[in-house]
Image (cartoon, rainbow, N blue to C red):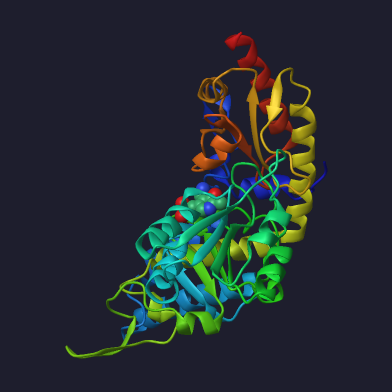
Amino acid sequence: IVWPELELIRNDFPILKQTVNGKPLVYLDNGATTQKPVQVLRAMQDYYTGYNSNVHRGVHTLSQQATSAYEAARHQVAHYIGAHNHEVVFTKGTTDAINLVAAGFRKEFLHEGDEIIISAMEHHSNIVPWQLACEEKKAHLKVVPVNDNGELDMEAFASMLNPRVKLVSIAWISNTLGTINPVKDIITLAHEQGIPVLLDAAQAAGHLPLKVHELDVDFLALSGHKVYGPTGIGILYGKEEWLNKLPPYQGGGDMIKHVTFEKTTYAEPPLKFEAGTPAIAEAIGLGAALAYITQTGIHKIMAYEHQLTAYALEQLRTIDGLRLVGDAKERSGAISFLIGDTHPSDVGVLLDQQGIAVRTGHHCTQPLMDRFECPGTVRASLAFYNTTAEIDRLVEGVRKAVTLLG
Ligand code: PMP
C-alpha cells in the first residue's frame, strides 16, 4: 500500500518513534485515543508561552489574542464539519456533548410515555445519559438490534419510528465493531416522521468527511482526543433552531446576557452552553488538529485507512481459530476479534510485551458484548500513521500469543 507522504507524516508524531518493552512501538489503540502531531503541541505551547489569557473578557491585547485564537478554532471546527460558527459548542468531549443534549431534552422535550431510540452498538456514553433521562421522565429507551455481522437492523429501525419518539441517537461508527452505520438513511427515515437525530461521531470524525448541513443532521458530537487533538475538548454541533430551543446546560460566567437576582437572560448560542472559563489551549489544539487533517486530506486518509483495514482483515483471517466480532460490509479500521477460548486480556498482555498496543475488554459497550455473548474482545484500531509493517507485527504478535497460550 503506497502512500508517499507516510514517512513525513510519521515524523510529525514523535511518540511513535520509541521502543516499548524493547520493541519498536506499534500503536493500534487509536479508537481509545489518537496520538498528537507536533503542530498541535506547538499551537498549545504558543498559547501558553505567547498569549495565555482569558477569553471574551479583557480589553487588553493578550485577552484579545486569546479570544481570536479560540474563536478561530471554532471557525476551524465549523469549516471542518460544514457548519456555521454559531452552531459549534465547545464541550469537554463527546460524553459531555451528549449529556448536554440529554439534559436539555430531559428538561424541555421528554415526557412520560415518550421514546428515545438508540442502538445495540452504542458506547455507554450514548446509553446512560438517555437511560437517566428516561428513568426520570418515565419515558422508554428503545434499542435498534444488530445482526450477527454487527450491522444495524434497518427494517427494525424503520418500524420503531412513531410519533412518541422524541430523538434518535446513534453512533456513526461503532468503536467496538468498526461498523459504519447508514447515517443518511437513518436521518431521512427519522425526518420523514419529524424526529431529530443525534450522531455520535467520536469514531467517525478523523476517518471520513463530516458535512453536517449536507447530512441535515440535528446534532453531532465528537471528541478532540480522537482526532489527533488534546483531551478535555470536544464539540456539539446543533442546528441553529435546536440550539435556540435547548435550555442552558450549566450556569455561570460567559453564558449570560444579563444577571439580576430575580432573573437572568442568556447569551446567544453557542456561548449559552459554554459556562465558565473554557478549555482554551485545548480548543486551539483541536483547531490545529483539524487543520492538520485537512492539510493531509481526509479523502487520502480515508482511502489509505480503507486499504490498510482490508490488509489487516485479510492477514488476521489467516490465523487459526480467530473470530472477528463484527464483520460489516461497510466498516472502519476498528477491528475486534477473539481467538479460540483465549481471554482477550491475556492476548493484550502478550502483545504489549512485544511493543504492540491494542485494547482489550468491553470497550464501554457492555450490552453489545452481551449481544455477541463474549466478555470482551481484543481490538486493534488503526489510524493513518499506521503502516503495513505494523499490521504484520500485529499478526505475528497474535500468532505468538496464541502459541504461548496453547
Ligand atoms: N462514543 C464513541 C463511539 C466512542 O468511541 C467514545 C470514546 N471511546 C465515546 C463516545 C466517548 O468519548 P469521550 O470519552 O471522549 O467523551
Q: Quadrant of the C terminus?
A: top right
Q: Is residue 349 above or below residue 154?
A: above
User: Going by the image, does 152 lie left or right of 264?
Assistant: right
Q: Residue at x 40, y 80 (%)?
A: 271
Q: Nearer the viewer, residue 394 or 295?
A: 394
Q: Quadrant of the N terminus?
A: top right
Q: Residue at x 75, y 50 (%)?
A: 5
Total of numbered circles in the picture?
Answer: 0
User: Going by the image, does 366 lie left or right of 276?
Assistant: right
Residue 36 visible in this rendered orientation of the protein: no
Q: In the current view of this chain or complex, which residue is farthest to the left?
A: 261
Give x and y (percent) for residue 69: 47, 75
Residue 283 visible in this rendered orientation of the protein: yes
Q: Is residue 375 above or below residue 45?
A: above
Q: Nearer the viewer, residue 108 or 78?
A: 108
Q: Residue at x 65, y 72 (%)?
A: 212
Give x and y (percent) for residue 230: 47, 56
User: Going by the image, does 250 lie left or right of 304?
Assistant: left
Give x and y (percent) for residue 305: 74, 47
Q: Quadrant of residue 77?
A: bottom right
Q: In the current view of this chain or complex, which residue is farthest to the right?
A: 2
Q: Nearer the viewer, residue 115 or 303?
A: 115
Give x and y (percent) for residue 111: 42, 71
Q: In the current view of this chain or complex, which residue is farthest to the front?
A: 113
Q: Is residue 253 above or below residue 302?
A: below
Q: In the current view of this chain or complex, which residue is farthest to the top?
A: 406
Q: Quadrant of residue 64?
A: bottom left
User: Going by the image, does 334 lie left or right of 266?
Assistant: right
